[in-house]
Amino acid sequence: MVRFETESNEKREVWAKLEFYNAFSKSIKDRPVWNMLIKALEKGILRHALEEATSGNVGISLACLSNIFGLKFTAYIPKPTPKATEVLLKILGARAVRTEYQVIDRHFWTEVSKHASKVGATNLNQYENDANFEIHYEITAKEIIEQLEAIGRVPDFVIAGIGTSGHIAGISKKLKEKYGDQVKVIGVQPAPDSNIPGIKRVETGPKWFSIAKIDEIIDISWKEAVEGVIEVARREGILIGISSGAVFQAYKRLSDREGVFVLIFPDDGFKYIEHFEKYLELYSKRE
């Protein structure tokens, strides 16, 4: 975790948990992917081939780990997936199938699950697999507690994106068990007309959302998210991903409040060059 000096003062401390220090996909998704694979191996259900619906980091992590485990991996990706993600999947030896789906919804991942069963492949299904939630409850949240306790701090606000709901639910449950309602958990979702890689609106029905005990949900537009990336890059010298930019913008909505803030940044910005290029084309000349 890194203290944001430009945002911290005598009344407020801001800590960013930089999940892009994970080794495989450079994202928070390494945690559930590893746990899902190990659990499947222990249960004896891990076949030679894997198929998964993914928009990015889960696919890259699975591609890396498939090479380690000697597996054949096929990633089914939605149409808007950045080209960089598809290229990285292919470099890693995975088969990338770009579909006509605009987002990953229940129909999409159910179709992939059925296809995997038909061809004799394993579908870990990050959207329903409790190993996703479990790893964040047991490990990610524990890290936050231990890292803050080491410097004598207790979190007042934790801000995280809502995707599969695995990490926000796991972190929320563990922290509220320890600190009660002292800690407020803030969820971040795309504004109604925006598509932000890695996060989804709660209407999509993420499995663990009901146990997350989220205190507030904040809508952030795609434009705001990219501007959050730019602000963090130019003020703190850290290049974060777009969902992380959305988390930062949600924090700014609350920055008049006092206390210790923890911002969960799922990945870095290097996979999202196309998004940044689009933003510059649309807005840099106007400004």
Image (cartoon, grey):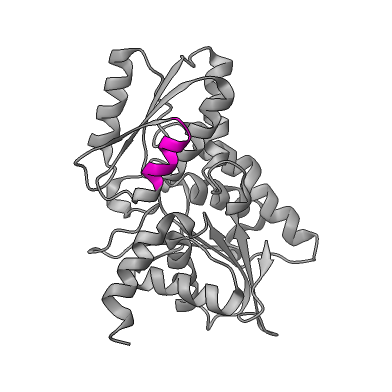
Report the residue at 24% width, 46% height from top: 79
Q: Looking at the image, which residue is at 70% across and 64% down? A: 154
Q: Is residue 98 above or below residue 172?
A: above
Check residue 218 for magenta coloring: no
**Can residue 221 be spotted in the picture?**
no
The quadrant the N terminus occupies is bottom right
Q: Magenta span covers which residues?
A: 85-93
Residue 285 position (above or below residue 61): below
- Horizontally, residue 83 falls left or right of residue 129, namely left
Residue 75 left/right relative to 138: left
92 within the magenta span: yes
Would residue 202 appear left or right of 15 to someone viewing this image? left
Q: Residue furthest bottom?
A: 287
Prevalent SS, magenta region: helix
Residue 223 in the image: state x and y as whole percent.
Answer: 33, 71
Residue 249: image location, x then y, percent: 45, 73
Q: Quadrant of residue 13?
A: bottom right
Residue 223 appears left or right of 67:
left
Q: Give how far across and how far down residue 165 sits, in percent.
A: 43, 47
What residue is rendered at 21% in x and 42% in y?
Answer: 101
Quadrant for the C terminus, please. Answer: bottom left
Return the residue nearer the eye: 121 or 209.
121
- Give coordinates of residue 262: x percent, y percent: 60, 65
